[in-house]
Amino acid sequence: MELLNGFKNPFRSEYKRWVFLVGLVAISHLLFQSFLLPYGNALRSLLLPGIDDSIEGNYGNVVSPVRSGSKSVVVRNTLTINGSDFSTRDVILFNDGSGGGDVGISSRKIGDWVEKGVSKVIFDGNVDDDYAFKNGEDLNENAVLEEVIRDQDNYVNASSRIEQVAQHGREVSTGELRDVNTTSQYPALSSIANPTPNAGSSFRSTSLQSDHTVSKSNFLMVVKPGKKKMRCEMPPKTVTTIDEMNRILLRHRRSSRAMRPRRSSIRDQEIFAVKSRIENGPVITSEQDLYAPVFRNVSLFKRSYELMERMLKVYVYKDGKKPIFHLPILKGLYASEGWFMKLMQGNKHFVVKDPRRAHLFYMPFSSRMLEYTLYVRNSHNRTNLRQFLKDYTETISAKYPYFNRTDGADHFLVACHDWAPYETRHHMEHCIKALCNADVTAGFKIGRDVSLPETYVRSARNPLRDLGGKPASQRHILAFYAGSMHGYLRPILLKHWKDKDTDMKILGPMPPGVASKMNYIQHMKSTKYCICPKGYEVNSPRVVESIFYECVPVIISDNFVPPFFEVLDWGAFSIILAEKDIPNLKDILTSIPQERYLALQLGVRKVQRHFLWHAKPERYDLFHMTLHSIWYNRVYQIKLR
């Protein structure tokens, strides 16, 4: 018995100690939790202003607008919350600095950021990214339209003011266009700002709110280690040479990839017959109107152009309201899309009121005004821009029978903003796209799409101001470049050539002011070869500027399809170099014989007429060349059953 009691006592003693230890741990845990939670919530509210503590349920990849007392907070990339697992991936919050209001966020795809899984720190709303305004010139454009249009009551007045600015090329201050609202004017924006999931979707949306005021210095970043570079900061992974582009064009001329119409019309038959008439016509031996060396085949071009003048009819959709539709911007970096819109809509020779008579259908929107009106500054989210055009396409598809008949193959758009390839992806994929950003790695289709010249128009009233340059014998500067350091290529150019050679006037940004602009122009007028390196995207206004000032353009931009590539022979009036050739730039230019340079400079002067805007269109000018390339590509793409 004593032995048994001796055994029980140690057991009970050990058991009591164990119970005491477990109880102590439990009480400590409860005390710790009761202490931590209130302060934890307070701490989280300080670190994560704008996020409500009561987050319920299973949420997917879509996050709805974030509201805060007086400042906007944007959550970029995905915030994934599962019932048992709260995990934050690549979440960045920043102060928009816009003074409040709702910011629509779709984190399923936030432009190129989500596609590339990019994480980036943003301080005080400023960021060095792929979406910066191009060349800095956009900020001084006639439409420095920085505020998103708000307040429908003031919309009519605001629209008329914007239209006046666009028509006359006058610069406008941000104060003139403050407090105007497009949310009710453009339903698509409301649907993006407040996404409604599809019935069968596993994604749900939530509204994250906070009563806290965000200070300009309160930011949080939870990111993966290391900074990933933007697409504009890196050379392309693949390079398509100009010779390869020529082979692609010939291949697509022989075999069209366009869809056959669901219902063939008499207009299809008319345009289908044009191809044989172009190819089987007489060869032109002498042509007074055109300079043959700058064309691939002047005979084909001449016959195609004349048939366009006699036959082509275009229907311009009346749908869509200003400022995104029917409002041309006539000055600045994106003037090409505006001038074409103005001249197309006012044209009585090509435009018809009856769509049944039309061979082609024009969708008259401005990619520049789309960006100005709908893009939330510094949000890095262009999804709502693409959604807006998707809604527009679906509207005209439902209202008219023409788009669905060919999947848009006989429809065309003209857009000069860098974002246009992204904005028109998928829903306008089969349309003919006249784009300034003619990048074969960004979806540009050689033989179907048209490379639109990017023209920097300094005077809307006189787009031909300062036209011309010195004769070849008076051009004593070998090469010239001046401009901002956008993208990865221009810093490389300056690294090799800035202040390295007196013959190579390779400079950085020129100081602001009229005198500086005139100095820039005089340099181009006095230079043999004007260097045209890519910026953020493959296109640059310097290509057309060079032709404008009769300087031989030296294009350094891999994967860039030169303007009017389907009809012009760029080897007759330009030098196209690979980006890797920058270290040998002077050797390449000095190795060109004088006779060759004189032929190139003559080609520039002869081709110049095809790159000029006129208030009243002239034969073979930029308006007609753009329309012809759209027509020409349609002729070679059309199929019949």
Image (tube, rainbow, N blue to C red):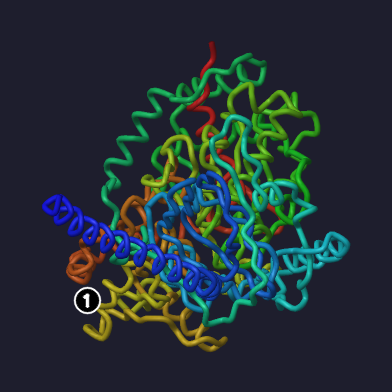
Q: Inspect the image, locate mark 1, and give the three-letter code of the amino acid beneath it.
A: His
Q: Residue 118 at what x, y percent from top left?
A: 38, 58
List the single residue furthest toward the front: 1
Locate residue 395 relative to residue 123 in the image: left or right: right
List the single residue furthest toward the top: 641
In this view, 426 is above or below 611: above
Q: Residue 106 at what x, y percent from top left?
A: 56, 51
Locate residue 194 relative to residue 302 in the image: left or right: right
Give the number of callouts: 1
Residue 482, picture quadrant: bottom left
In this view, 370 is above or below 301: below
Q: Residues within 10 Å of mark 1 (few under 14, many from 20)?
A: some
What residue sits 69% from the left and 32% below the top? 313
Residue 263, picture quadrant: top right
SS label for mark 1: helix
Q: Residue 410 at what x, y percent from top left?
A: 60, 29
What residue sits 88% from the left and 62% below the top? 153
Locate residue 228 relative to residue 372 in the image: left or right: left
Residue 132 appears anywhere in the view: no
In this view, 523 is above or below 77: below
In this view, 567 is above or below 158: above
Q: Residue 228 at what x, y percent from top left?
A: 32, 62
Q: Which residue is mark 1?
A: 496
Q: Nearer the viewer, residue 442 or 551?
A: 442
Q: Nearer the viewer, residue 229 or 132?
A: 229
Q: Nearer the viewer, residue 147 or 226?
A: 226
Residue 444 appears anywhere in the view: yes
Residue 255, picture quadrant: top left
List the single residue furthest toward the left: 3
